[in-house]
């Protein structure tokens, strides 16, 4: 997987987070996420299934009305990529920046996501 391929796949994935349409969110998630994918975040231990991700997408739209995700950067090799996500509020202000590690299966769908909470420049 090239950086460009990872960017395009992740951009499509983030479009599911960014839409308020439940139908569009389900359509995109079904296209880009493996049904039995692994999903791990600071709030979730390892969960199985795209449905958990879809629930988090809906919760994001409730918590940050009008907000959206953008991509900060990408680095990939083989079938794994590290991507920086950026949360932008409705007023255009950046409020958080964190990262995802994605693993992509042979069918081109994301099979695993490990989400890292917003990063800090100095942990002290």
Image (cartoon, grey):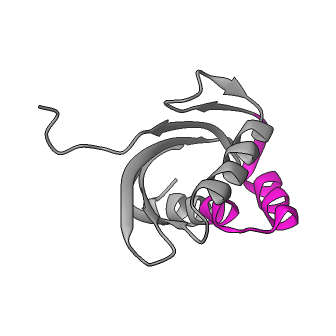
Spot occupied by residue 15 in the image (x, y as percentages of width and height): 65, 66
Q: Is residue 89 above or below residue 39?
A: below
Image quadrant where residue 45 sits = top right
Q: Quadrant of the C terminus?
A: top left
In this rendering, position of residue 122 left or right of residue 56: left
Q: Is residue 67 above or below residue 42?
A: below
* Residue 27 highlighted magenta (yes or no): yes
Q: Main secondary structure of the magenta part?
A: helix
Camera-side residue: 7 or 63?
A: 63
In this rendering, position of residue 87 left or right of residue 39: left
Spot occupied by residue 12 in the image (x, y as percentages of width and height): 65, 65
In this rendering, position of residue 116 left or right of residue 68: left
Q: Residue at x 53, y 33 (%)?
A: 41
Q: Residue at x 74, y 68 (%)?
A: 20
Q: Is residue 93 above or below residue 31?
A: below
Residue most toward the bottom? 91
Camera-side residue: 11 or 96?
A: 96
In this rendering, position of residue 69 left or right of residue 82: right
Q: Which residues are magenta?
A: 12-36
Camera-side residue: 31 or 20?
A: 20
Q: Is residue 86 visible?
A: yes
């Amino acid at each position: 997987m090239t950086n460009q391929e990872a960017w395009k796949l992740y951009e499509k994935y983030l479009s599911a987070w960014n839409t308020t349409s439940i139908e569009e969110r389900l359509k995109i998630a079904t296209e880009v996420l493996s049904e039995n994918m692994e999903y791990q975040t600071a709030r979730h231990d390892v969960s199985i299934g795209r449905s958990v991700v879809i629930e988090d997408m809906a919760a994001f739209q409730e918590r940050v009305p009008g907000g959206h995700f953008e991509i900060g950067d990408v680095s990939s090799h083989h079938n794994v990529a590290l991507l920086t996500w950026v949360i932008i509020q409705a007023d255009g202000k950046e409020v958080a920046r964190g990262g995802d590690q994605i693993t992509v299966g042979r069918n081109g769908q994301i099979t695993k996501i490990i989400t890292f909470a917003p990063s800090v420049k100095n942990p002290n």
